[in-house]
Each structure stands twice: as structure tokens, then as C-alpha cells.
Amino acid sequence: QVQLVNSGGGLVQPGGSLRISCAASRYTLEYHNIGWFRQAPGKEREGVSCISSNGTTWYAESVKGRFTISRDNAKTTVYLQMSNLKPEDTAVYYCAATAPYYNGSYLRGYDYWGQGTQVTVSS
């Protein structure tokens, strides 16, 4: 069972930066696709970014050039570095993991979810 813990959210002004984390305790995420999703009040959950087990990355058009997804060397933590944040980025951000060696769409196949972390962009 993969247990994911999200952290790093908070309040930031427009144009600011924030890094959120997705950690798996005593478990390597090396063979899993890891995705970041977000859900704003009154809106459906949407995919933000994904990093595959081989390191390929994907970004939603709305965050391209502003967000960067990465893994640490120990492959136990995945980060989402968010820059030039906008009020419309305000949401609860969740990370999720697929089963090992999943080879489907970047936005599907997620079996394990973190608890979410609130990101609020406001002046």
C-alpha cells in the first residue's frame, strides 16, 4: 500500500512562488507515475502535471512555463515548484500515484492519493 503525504501549501501573493511536496514514507516512487491534481471550490478536479517512471513530464496548458515537477534522488518525494502564481491557481492540490509500471494516459490510472494541501493565491 502506497501512502502519500502532501505538504507545503499556504498563502502566497500573486506573482509569488511556492513548492509543494508529495512524500512516500519508506517507499520508493521510482516505478510509479506521479501526478498533481487540483480542485478549486465549485470546480471539477483537473490534472496539473505528471512525471512518469522514466522521467517524462507533462503539464496542463494553464501552468506551462510556471510550474515544474521533479523527483528527489532517493525517489521518495515528488515536488511541484510553482512560480508566477495567479489567483486562479487557488485550489487544494493533491498528488497521486499509479501502480508500478503503469503505461497508460498521464491523467489516468491513479490508485493512491495524498490528503491534499491548500494553496491560496491572494493579495
Image: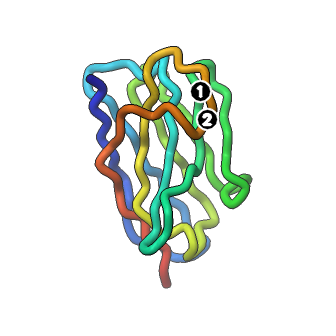
Callout 2 touching callout 1 (CB < 8 Å): yes
Q: Which mark is residue 106?
A: 2
- Residue 95 on image: x %, y %: 42, 43
- Residue 35 on image: x %, y %: 51, 39
Kind of residue at disc 2: Tyr
Q: Secondary structure at mark 2?
A: loop
87 and 101: which is toward the camera: 101
- The quadrant of the picture occupied by the N terminus is top left
Measuring 59% from the left and 27% from the top, which residue is drawn there? 52
- Residue 93 on image: x %, y %: 43, 55
Mark 1 residue crowding within 10 angstroms, few (<14) / some (14–19) / many (20+): many
Nearer to us of marks 2 and 1 is 2
Q: Which mark is residue 52?
A: 1
Kind of residue at disc 1: Ser
Q: Secondary structure at mark 1?
A: loop
111 and 37: which is toward the camera: 111
Sequence-first disc among 2 and 1: 1
